[in-house]
Image (tube, grey):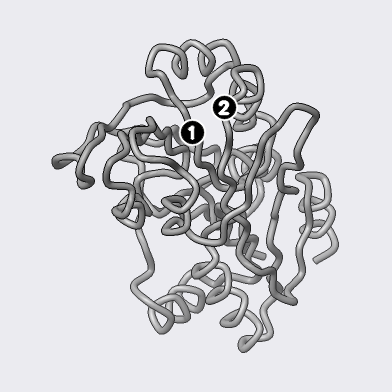
């Protein structure tokens, strides 16, 4: 049995460590230039569309697919789930629970990046914890200074009217985030509800500094099999 692990997240890395020694192929999109190596066979880059993905599954002799991509990689997840269903191939998504507000948090949920401008006043400094992939969807934040953190150095100029890239590789401690938000005079934080303790440090820092947060809601969940923990994912694999 050969398992395809759609990776690229911390959860995928931890699952790969548990699966080491089994017949597993991990696939990462290649968005990060120098990702840390995984302890299983790894391929890098996209599949080239639905037909190419079907062809890959057949050529590689894949028996089952575990989807541990980012909670907001909904296009990949929906496509993969649909293809596996059509092939009668076992498929499971590892989706960690989203964050919930804690005492002192000041969160406002928004459905899309474009909605942020309706909440953030002119002149504010905005820290985007949403990644560079959706940065251009914040183009209507003209009149605010926008900071976008990413792992790799940028390949071009900052695409918005006023702002900057900030280079940094996680994890970041609460103390790191507090110091950063103070140094940059951050007024607003915008994040995706990715879940997980490691990424929550920026929310804890915002709580400490009383910085309001705009929280992008998660994409709708489909009717495919889904588990929330590494242990549950391993149990699913063992039951195949």
Q: Quadrant of residue 124?
A: top left
Q: Nearer the viewer, residue 235 or 175?
A: 175
Most extreme residue toward the left is 156
Q: Quadrant of residue 136?
A: bottom left
Verify CB contact (< 8 Å) between mark 1 and mark 2. Answer: yes
Residue 112 on image: x %, y %:
49, 60
Alpha-carbon neighbours of circle 1 within 10 Å: few (<14), some, or many (≥20)? many
The total of numbered circles placed on residues is: 2
Element under label 2?
loop
Q: Nearer the viewer, residue 229 or 65?
A: 229
- For image coordinates 57% across by 68% down, the residue present is 77
Residue 76 on image: x %, y %:
50, 68
Whether residue 180 is situated above or below residue 54 in the rendered picture: above
Most extreme residue toward the bottom is 86
Q: What label sits on residue 188 in the rendered view?
A: 1
The residue to which callout 2 is attached is: 211
Question: Mark 1 or 2 closer to N-term?
Answer: 1
Whether residue 96 is situated above or below residue 58 in the rendered picture: above
Q: Quadrant of residue 134?
A: bottom left
């Amino acid at each position: 049995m050969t398992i395809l692990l759609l990776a690229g997240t911390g959860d995928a890395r931890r699952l790969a460590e548990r699966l080491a020694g089994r017949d597993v192929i991990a696939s990462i999109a290649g968005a990060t230039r120098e990702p840390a190596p995984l302890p299983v066979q790894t391929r890098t880059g996209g599949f080239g569309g639905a037909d190419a993905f079907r062809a890959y599954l057949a050529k590689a002799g894949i028996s089952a697919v575990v989807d541990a991509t980012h909670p907001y990689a909904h296009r990949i997840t929906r496509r993969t789930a649909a293809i596996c269903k059509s092939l009668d191939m076992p498929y499971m998504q590892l989706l960690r629970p989203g964050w919930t507000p804690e005492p002192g948090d000041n969160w406002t949920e928004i459905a899309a990046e474009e909605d942020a401008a309706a909440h953030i006043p002119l002149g504010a400094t905005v820290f985007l914890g949403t990644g560079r992939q959706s940065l251009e969807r914040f183009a209507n934040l003209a009149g605010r200074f926008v900071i976008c953190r990413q792992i790799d150095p940028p390949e071009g100029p900052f695409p918005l009217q006023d702002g900057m890239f900030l280079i940094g590789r996680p994890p970041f401690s609460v103390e790191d985030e507090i110091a950063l938000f103070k140094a940059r005079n951050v007024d607003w934080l915008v994040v995706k509800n990715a879940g997980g303790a490691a990424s929550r440090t920026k929310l804890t820092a915002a709580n400490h500094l009383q910085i309001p947060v705009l929280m992008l809601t998660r994409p709708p969940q489909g009717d495919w099999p889904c588990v929330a923990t590494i242990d549950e994912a391993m149990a699913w694999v063992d039951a195949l």
